[in-house]
Image (cartoon, rainbow, N blue to C red):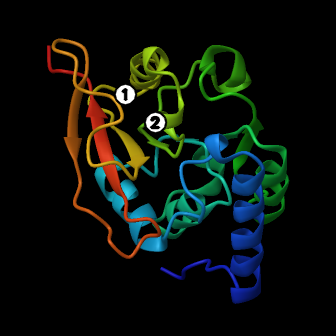
Amino acid sequence: MKKAGVPLGKRFEDEVLFFRTWATNPIKLGAFSPTSRALAELMIKHAAPDPQGYTLELGPGTGAVTEALLDAGIPAERVVAIEYDAGFYRRLRQRFPQVNLIRGDALDLENTLGEFRGIRFSAALSGLPLLNIPKARRAPYLEGVLERLVPGGIVSQLSYSLTPPQEAIPGRLKVAKSKWVTFNLPPGRAWIYTRPSA
């Protein structure tokens, strides 16, 4: 499959936009550089989205994971992406016009999803910086996303932490980890969240 790829000049623009956003409000972002291709592909591998279903992307930023999703064969019209930052939203809208892009709060999916509220997504990929979110809101966020997935659906959560941004909760939330992607800046991994089997 032909990869969409982003020209070198555009990647540099992404780096500048990302760094400028980070410098203005570091708490908003979990890193000072966009997600690498290798880490984006690892997140997708663990989420295992179904091209026939819908895929939910939360906090796409400059679109590294979005681009990797499309290159992995997920149709653009089957991706629903929620971005809070206005600058990132404008860039995503230009680059991925076929993606269902929503500007809104991923921590409030009930009000943000709009016409997609009733969809059962095949998988979710989250780039939200959970460690910058109050601890009391992390489990409700992850459980809320899992409730919107098909049975067995996975949330693949980006993180740069040695420990999970949200620990497992017996009977409610299971967590596993991917390998490290050391070539990411900073090194990162995916934390894989699922619902316990009944």
Q: Residues within 10 Å of mark 2 (few under 14, many from 20)?
A: some
Residue 38 in percent (x, y) is at 40, 72
Query: Which amino acid type is shown beneath numbered disc 1?
Result: Val
Q: Residue at x 83, y 52 (%)?
A: 87
Residue 114 in percent (x, y) is at 73, 22
Quadrant placement of the C terminus: top left
Whether residue 169 is visible: yes
Q: Which residue is mark 1?
A: 150
Kindly indicate the quadrant of the structure image that contains residue 27.
Answer: top right
Depth check, front residue: 125 or 198? 125
Q: Give the left or right position of residue 95, taking residue 126 as reference.
A: right
Q: Residue at x 62, y 50 (%)?
A: 60
Total labels: the figure holds 2
Kindly indicate the quadrant of the structure image that contains residue 163.
Answer: top left
Q: Residue at x 52, y 41 (%)?
A: 129
Query: Which amino acid type is shown beneath numbered disc 2?
Result: Leu
Depth check, front residue: 160 or 82? 160
Q: Give the left or right position of residue 194, taking residue 30 as reference.
A: left
Q: Give the left or right position of residue 138, taking residue 20 as reference.
A: left
Residue 181 in percent (x, y) is at 32, 68
Mark 1 or 2: in front is 2
Mark linked to residue 131: 2
- Give the structural element (helix, strand or loop) at label 2: helix
Residue 37 in percent (x, y) is at 47, 72
